[in-house]
Amino acid sequence: MLVSYKWLNEYVDVKDVAPKELADRLSLTGIEVEGLESPEDGLKKIVVGDVKECIPHPDSDHLSICQVDIGEEELSQIVCGAPNIKAGVKVIVALPGSRIAGNVKIKKGKMRGQVSNGMICSLQELGFSDSVIPKEFSDGIYYLPEDAKVGTPVFPYLEMDDTIIDLSITPNRADALSIRGVAHEVAAIYNKKVAFPAVELKEVAEKASDKIKVSVTDKKDAPHYEIRVIEDVKIGPSPQWLQNRLMNEGIRPISNVVDVTNYILLLFGQPLHAFDYDKLGSQEILVCRATESESFTTLDGIERTLTPENIVITNGEIPVALAGVMGGLDSEISDETTTVALEMAMFDHTSVRRTSQSYNLRSESSMRFEKGINQSDISLAGEVAAAMIAELAGGKVLQGSVKGSEIHPENVKVSTTLENVNRFLGTALTQEQVNDIFTALGFESQVENGTTFVSVPPRRWDITIEADLMEEIARIYGYNNLPSTLPEGQTIAGFLTETQKATRKVRSLLEGAGLSEAISYALTTEAKAQQFLLKDSKVTRVAWPMSEDRSTMRLNLVSGLLEDLSYNVARKNSDVALYEIGHVFYQNNDPKKDLPIEENHVAIAVTGNATNKSWSNKPVAYDYFTVKGMVEALIEGLGLSGAITYKATQLKEMHPSQTAGIYLDEKLIGFVGQVHPKIASSYELKSVFVAELNLEALIEQEKTPLVFEAVSKYPAVSRDIAMLVDESNTNAEIAEVMTAAAGKFLAKLQVFDVYQGANIEVGKKSMAYNLTFVNPEATLKDEEINRFMAKVVKNLEEKINAVIR
């Protein structure tokens, strides 16, 4: 919000307060000031000139030689290239030795052989943005008012001697999105009175209700809607003061009628819209919802397809405006307009926001409707606008306004006590001081039996509860005046929950394995969210995402880690090993519950080399067994080795022959393996190995108690066994069969060879295992070992048809 210091002083007298000091006080009371700007800073020796003569340059087809009166005894010759230069106009002249925008110094010189004593300037050359310059002057020089005094500085005529305060308004202080709102704030800070001059609206005898009928289908969509009619207007440029004010506030002047609506927007914070009455096509205004796939062309010339989510203003049949967002091209004010239908309204803020976002039509009007407007000033803003249009465009205002709906705001009653105020703020304020603060804010208050009852006017719709009063007292008293105190109370030693302890242990185990922690976005695309799923789930979409890349809550951690790997590899960091602990968001497909279920997962992703090349070692790349080893170390560290099994599984995003499902008591809780080359390629990666587990399930599982055993003093005995089995038999199946038969003295079972190829039947594979037996109480004899091995062989032959080699 840009605030003119001069304009502000018209309503609250703070001329004795420098703009810098005012900005500092505003920042201290909760409204951040982003900056101060004086348009004339850096400019000098720029005066009013009167073009007395203008002839074409003899050696140029676009230059003109002008004789300009700059208040000196003789006319000054200036060569000008502007297409709209002519005799008889007052212009902006930069004298020799002057400085214009961009710290450019103007010197006396020659142009195509003709002397030029300075420069006739456009507004751009004084620092005005192209977006705020009136269109008729956007490609040429600017004409000053006829009464501008020749030879005097131009700054007062353009109000460049003003100071513009740039306020950053938070959503809860939308009341400050107007000059009147800021005036109330400044008056409260300096304990002054605001004075808004009364505007007399003169109406003719003819009634507006005879010209137009207004109705609203649903009062929730438009709690307040009214139309005023102004006839016999003459469209033309606004007076200089109004143009200056709008340009300083960052708005382009267009015409007297349109400029008045923008002026009222800034003054009251109340958006208005002016229709060309004769272009409406009927004598009716109906506020309703759009029909499905209805087409409508907005002021920017773009045809848009509407939906029933959009509130529209219609002429009874077709839309003429998108409520609170933008008017229609067919009913806009033009040079031929003679009758104006002026709209004052309040629309449902949710619908306005959805409409403005869905069509990317953010505007000053839609922003104010979204954040809230002063409901008590809607009609007053319309009356002031109608009076200004009558004055500036020569129109006549028809009697009364035609209302389709009307809101009657009332003061909100909020109470507090002096004891609560001082306890909350840590102050020692008196009741008189508190009452004075409410008076400065313009709130009526009275004290009854120690309770202060405050009547908050509708212009401060952000104040509804006692805590809001505390904030107002603190702001006006001064945050810098609040005492600094340390919190009192009994301290309690902190502790970690079992879940927190387990999570820390997981981090320690994974970092000990050489992984670095990553934190990825919880929002992703819908396609990536549905990759690497452990169970079926519908996606959870964000209602109003900032972009499609961050539109859906994730259902896995791996896709985020793959993005992290891709980011690193693209920057020549080719050896990356990451892990992440975070939530995924499942939907249980219950139509009664829209909120997702958050489930804590842990994931690993590695690419490149596990061991780099050195003088003594060759590089070793990450593979399936590296990642599986990390998972096994994690499981073992959590004390769950006995409850976890691995089975070959199929995931469409994973390599079909290098992926294992991780099961906890026969329930799938994760997977480990190589990412499918096509998926890896889509992330611009080569060989990638990943794992993801349901961390919640691991933490909640009852742990096997850790039992310490002394190292056996009796020797261990090892035996090897090789067998021929079907290639479909997995290591887990074979190990289970062998363990069941080996007996209680089996201490270790390990596969040490797998072979397929020459001399092995097609569809078969050779596997060799080492079995280690230990009896902690006695030395094992060969007869016992042979008996155990015989049982193992028999079990293998019967259960999986193994052929012992």
Image (tube, rainbow, N blue to C red):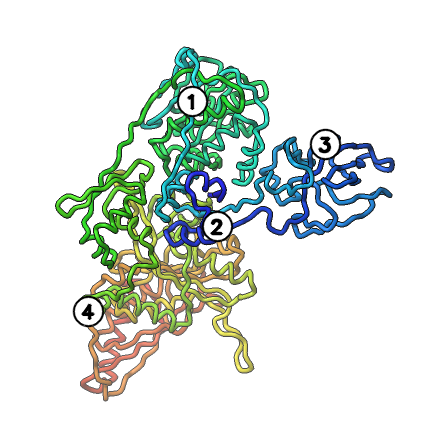
Cα distance in 3D space between marks 4 and 2: 50 Å
- Identify the secondary structure beneath mark 3: loop
Residue annotated with mark 1: 201
- Identify the secondary structure beneath mark 2: helix
Question: 720 or 679: nearer the eye?
Answer: 679
- Identify the secondary structure beneath mark 4: loop
Residue annotated with mark 3: 84
Cα distance in 3D space between marks 1 and 4: 68 Å
Cα distance in 3D space between marks 4 and 3: 79 Å
- Are the residues at dot 2 and dot 3 in contact (C-beta closer than 8 Å)? no
Question: Residue 687: x and y, percent?
Answer: 50, 61
Q: Disc 3 residue type?
A: Asn
307, above or below 778, in the image: above
Cα distance in 3D space between marks 1 and 3: 39 Å
Q: Disc 2 residue type?
A: Pro
* Occupied quadrant, residue 187: top left
Question: Residue 161: x and y, percent?
Answer: 57, 45
Q: Disc 4 residue type?
A: Ile
Badge 4 or badge 2: first in the primary sequence: 2
- What residue appears at the point 74 percent right and 43 percent down from the top-left corner? 119
The quadrant of the picture occupied by the C terminus is: bottom left
Cα distance in 3D space between marks 2 and 3: 37 Å
- Are the residues at dot 4 and dot 2 in contact (C-beta closer than 8 Å)? no
Residue annotated with mark 4: 492
**Viewer-side label of 1, 4:** 1
